[in-house]
């Protein structure tokens, strides 16, 4: 099987995660949160989603595939911090401003 090529800052998620969005507190763009391999929560920009073949089942959508839930594809999204126009707000101080 071949892993889809990801650009720097891109992460894979499945359709269920893609539909569970919440707006960014900085710029209002829809984001979805994922857990990275290191167990950190990371927001991804839903607007950047592109479909890629599921690496676990080679895009076949196998019935037992847990990774894509038999959809055959996953979505590659960019880390929202990479393109959020308001990200400087978050990196400067801790916690949201009143
Ligand atoms: Zn799959
Ligand atoms: Zn934002």
Image: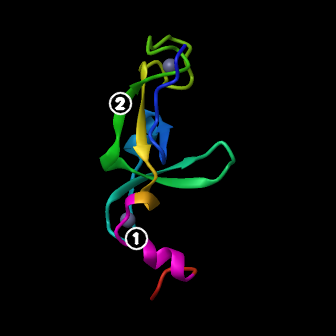
Q: Which residue is rendered at x = 46% and y = 86% of the image?
A: 97
Task: Specify the principal SS of the magenta part.
Answer: helix
Q: Quadrant of the N terminus?
A: top right
Queried whether the magenta region covers residue 48, the answer comes back as no
Tell me the residue that label 1 is attached to.
25
Tell me the residue that label 2 is attached to.
51
- Segment colored magenta: 83-93
Q: Quadrant of residue 83?
A: bottom left
Q: Position of residue 48 (x, y in %)?
A: 33, 46
Q: Is residue 25 left or right of residue 28?
A: right
- Where disc 2 sits, the SS reads strand
Q: Please identify, in this view, whether the residue under mark 1 or under mark 2 is nearer the observer.
A: 2
Q: Which residue is rendered at x = 47% and y = 22% of the image?
A: 54
Q: Which mark is residue 80?
A: none
Q: Which residue is rendered at x = 49% and y = 37% of the image?
A: 12
Q: Residue placed farthest to the right in the image?
A: 38
Determine whether the beta carbon of the residue marked 1 sits less than 8 angstroms from the nearest atom of ligand 2. yes
Q: Position of residue 50 (x, y in %)?
A: 34, 35
């Amino acid at each position: 099987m071949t892993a889809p090529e990801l650009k720097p800052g891109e992460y894979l998620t499945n359709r269920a995660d893609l539909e569970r969005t919440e707006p960014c507190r900085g710029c209002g763009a829809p984001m979805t949160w994922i857990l990275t391999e290191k167990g950190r929560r990371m927001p991804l920009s839903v607007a950047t989603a592109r479909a890629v073949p599921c690496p676990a089942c080679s895009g076949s959508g196998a019935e037992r595939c847990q990774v894509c839930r038999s959809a055959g594809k996953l979505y590659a999204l960019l880390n929202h911090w990479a393109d959020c126009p308001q990200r400087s707000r978050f990196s400067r101080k801790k916690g949201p401003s009143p």
